[in-house]
Image (cartoon, helix red, strand yellow):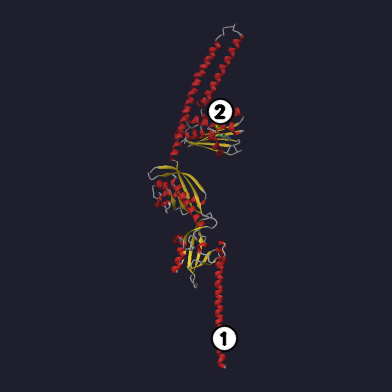
């Protein structure tokens, strides 16, 4: 009895153990099916489980949703039908047997897993689908045998059609850009934020005389002369410190040893977060343009000089010959018919009119001669001629003109420089009268070795120089332009400072280095 009881107890314990182990197994199973459930129902994945005949056993919720099929009702469904392959009914035997199936990468991959038991990871395959719009879809396929299960395999599908389209568009765009950059005749280069070249175009290779492969990865110190490299580096640093664009003129030595005038246009490159990742630069060779500009400048200066000589010649001719002759004519005319008391009243009146007209012509000719070459310049010297001119201008236009000359008296100023300075003041004052609506002008004419400075400042309405410069060319306004050219002609420069309602200040600075010309009070 005792033994039977003990045995029973033993059996109960064994049974309890067994029950506990089954419970544990169940728990394990529940856990696994929970994982399975999570993967199948909740994750955004296209997963199907198919048997060795290609029949779909199960599929993830997302795949089910996207196909709109009902597995229970429409069983068995073949993989091809599920994926909406346009060929799935090509053959009477159905999916997997048509001529197209022999070349189908999807079928080939699945079949290989069935045959060898090997898994595949992200095999790219094409599928012509009849889903909504017939179109080529690009799929990535991963396959594996389902463990502990009889002849079933799991297939994970990723549709990368859109991604591929995007990649193709991006490649096309990149190819287009590369072709464009290669075709452009301007040298173009890119650098990363460490200042290392990351790329360039053919034109940059030609410009530097170096191959792309010798440029990429190098800094400017490794490919250029040290002194120049340092300047390049500094400019790049400035751009990195103030991201955006950069534009400047530069002189560059070419491999052939020639110096070229160039313009650099650079811009910083950024990542998606806006961090600076590098820069791109375009070089424009403006040597020819500069030469043409220099030539135009020289020609226009020569023209101005010739014009000045011509004016002087005409002025002399008008004054010395024509005005003289007119005066003689007036004298002769006065004598005519003097001893004719019987002269008709009418004729007498006409004679007086003609005489008056001759007077007027003489006056006009003299004025013209004066305008062409102010004689005061020759007789009084520049400073006094300017004083006289300013006084006349002030009286005529009711504008207060304040003229000061300091340190000029002792300087030997060439006649060419004198007439040009005179004309500069003339044009500046004429602009004040025409455009400024000013009540006061201050002119300072200062000599301080080695500079001669002429400052003309009005209290008028001023103007926006940048804005006006653009329209000035179209309107063929040449006053300011010719003033600048005159200043250049005298080896100097002219700067205009003007602001709306704040008046205009013109500063002309000439360089006169010849010490022999600085005498008298300015003797060095
Ligand atoms: N002192 C000034 N005050 C205001 N505007 C001026 C002054 N000087 C020049 N300007 C402006 O600059 C323009 C160009 O001057 P300029 O080249 O001498 O041509 P123009 O006198 O024939 O108009 C003028 O049309 C005027 O708008
Ligand atoms: Mg003018």
Residue drawn where x is 45% and y is 38% of the image: 289
Would you say residue 244 is visible in this rendering? yes
User: Which numbered disc, 1 or 2, marks the residue closer to the eye?
Assistant: 1
Between 335 and 295, the one nearer to me in the picture:
295
Determine the quadrant in which ligand 2 lies: top right
Q: What residue did someone put label 2 on? A: 389
Residue 29 in which image quadrant: bottom right
Residue 8 in which image quadrant: bottom right
As drawn, the residue found furthest toward the top would be 342
Between 97 and 435, the one nearer to me in the picture:
97
Judging from the image, what secondary structure is the residue with disc 2 in?
A: helix
State whether residue 88 is above or below residue 350: below
Residue drawn where x is 54% and y is 85% of the image: 14
> Which quarter shows the N terminus?
bottom right
Between 315 and 233, the one nearer to me in the picture:
233
The mark nearer the N terminus, 1 or 2, is 1
Judging from the image, what secondary structure is the residue with disc 1 in?
A: helix
The percent coordinates of residue 344 (x first, y second) are 60, 8
The percent coordinates of residue 382 (x first, y second) are 51, 29
**In the displayed structure image, the side of residue 466 where residue 182 appears, left or right:** left
Q: Are marks 1 and 2 in contact (CB under 8 Å)?
A: no
Q: Determine the CA span between mark 1 and mark 2.
A: 134 Å
Identify the disc placed on residue 123. none
Q: What residue did someone put label 1 on? A: 12
The percent coordinates of residue 477 (x first, y second) are 54, 33
The percent coordinates of residue 302 (x first, y second) are 45, 31
Q: Specify few, some or many for label 2: CA neighbours under 10 Å numbering under 14, 14-19, or 20 or more.
A: some
As drawn, the residue found furthest toward the bottom would be 1
State whether residue 200 is above or below residue 430: below
**In the displayed structure image, the side of residue 337 where residue 297 appears, left or right:** left
As drawn, the residue found furthest toward the front would be 92
Would you say residue 521 is visible in this rendering? no
């Amino acid at each position: 009895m005792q033994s039977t009881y003990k045995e029973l107890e033993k059996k109960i314990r064994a049974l309890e153990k067994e029950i506990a182990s089954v419970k544990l197994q169940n728990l394990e199973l529940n856990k696994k099916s929970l994982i399975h459930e999570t993967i199948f129902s909740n994750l955004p994945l296209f997963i199907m489980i198919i048997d060795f005949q290609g029949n779909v056993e199960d599929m993830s919720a997302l795949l089910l949703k996207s196909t709109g099929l009902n597995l229970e009702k429409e069983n068995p469904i073949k993989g091809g039908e599920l994926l909406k392959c346009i060929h799935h009914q090509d053959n009477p035997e159905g999916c997997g047997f048509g001529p197209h199936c022999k070349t189908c990468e999807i079928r080939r991959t699945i079949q290989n897993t069935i045959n060898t038991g090997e898994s595949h990871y992200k095999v790219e395959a094409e599928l012509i689908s009849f889903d909504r719009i017939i179109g080529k879809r690009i799929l990535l396929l991963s396959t594996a045998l389902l463990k502990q299960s009889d002849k079933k395999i799991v297939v994970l599908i990723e549709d990368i059609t859109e991604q591929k389209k995007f990649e193709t568009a991006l490649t096309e765009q990149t190819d287009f850009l590369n072709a464009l950059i290669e075709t452009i005749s301007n040298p173009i280069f890119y650098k990363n934020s460490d200042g290392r070249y990351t790329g360039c175009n053919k034109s940059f290779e030609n410009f530097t005389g170096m191959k792309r492969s010798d440029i990429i990865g190098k800094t400017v110190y490794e490919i250029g002369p040290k002194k120049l490299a340092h300047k390049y580096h500094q400019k790049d640093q400035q751009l990195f410190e103030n991201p955006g664009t950069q534009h400047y003129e530069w002189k560059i030595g070419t491999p052939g040893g020639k110096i070229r005038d160039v313009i650099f246009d650079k811009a910083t490159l950024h990542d998606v977060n806006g961090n600076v990742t590098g820069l791109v630069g375009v070089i424009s060779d403006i040597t020819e343009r500069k030469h043409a500009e220099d030539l135009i400048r020289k020609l226009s200066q020569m023209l101005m000089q010739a014009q000045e000589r011509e004016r002087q010649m005409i002025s002399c001719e008008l004054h010395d010959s024509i005005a003289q002759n007119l005066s003689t004519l007036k004298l002769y005319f006065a004598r005519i018919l003097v001893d004719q008391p019987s002269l008709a009243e009418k004729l007498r009146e006409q004679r007086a009119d003609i005489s008056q007209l001759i007077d007027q012509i003489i006056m006009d000719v003299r004025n013209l001669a004066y305008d062409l070459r102010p004689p005061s310049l020759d007789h009084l010297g520049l400073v006094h001629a300017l004083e006289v001119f300013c006084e006349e201008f002030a009286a005529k236009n009711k504008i207060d003109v304040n003229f000061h000359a300091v340190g000029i008296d002792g300087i030997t100023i060439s006649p060419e420089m004198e007439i040009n300075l005179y004309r500069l003041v003339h044009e500046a004052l004429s602009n004040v009268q025409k455009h400024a609506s000013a009540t006061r002008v201050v002119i300072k004419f200062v000599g301080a070795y080695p500079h001669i400075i002429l400052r003309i400042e009005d209290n008028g309405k001023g103007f926006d120089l940048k804005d006006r410069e653009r329209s000035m060319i179209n309107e063929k306004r040449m006053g300011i332009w010719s003033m600048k050219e005159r200043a250049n002609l005298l080896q100097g420069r002219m700067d205009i400072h003007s602001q709306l309602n704040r008046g205009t200040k013109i500063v002309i600075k000439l360089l006169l280095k010849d010490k022999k010309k600085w005498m008298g009070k300015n003797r060095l």
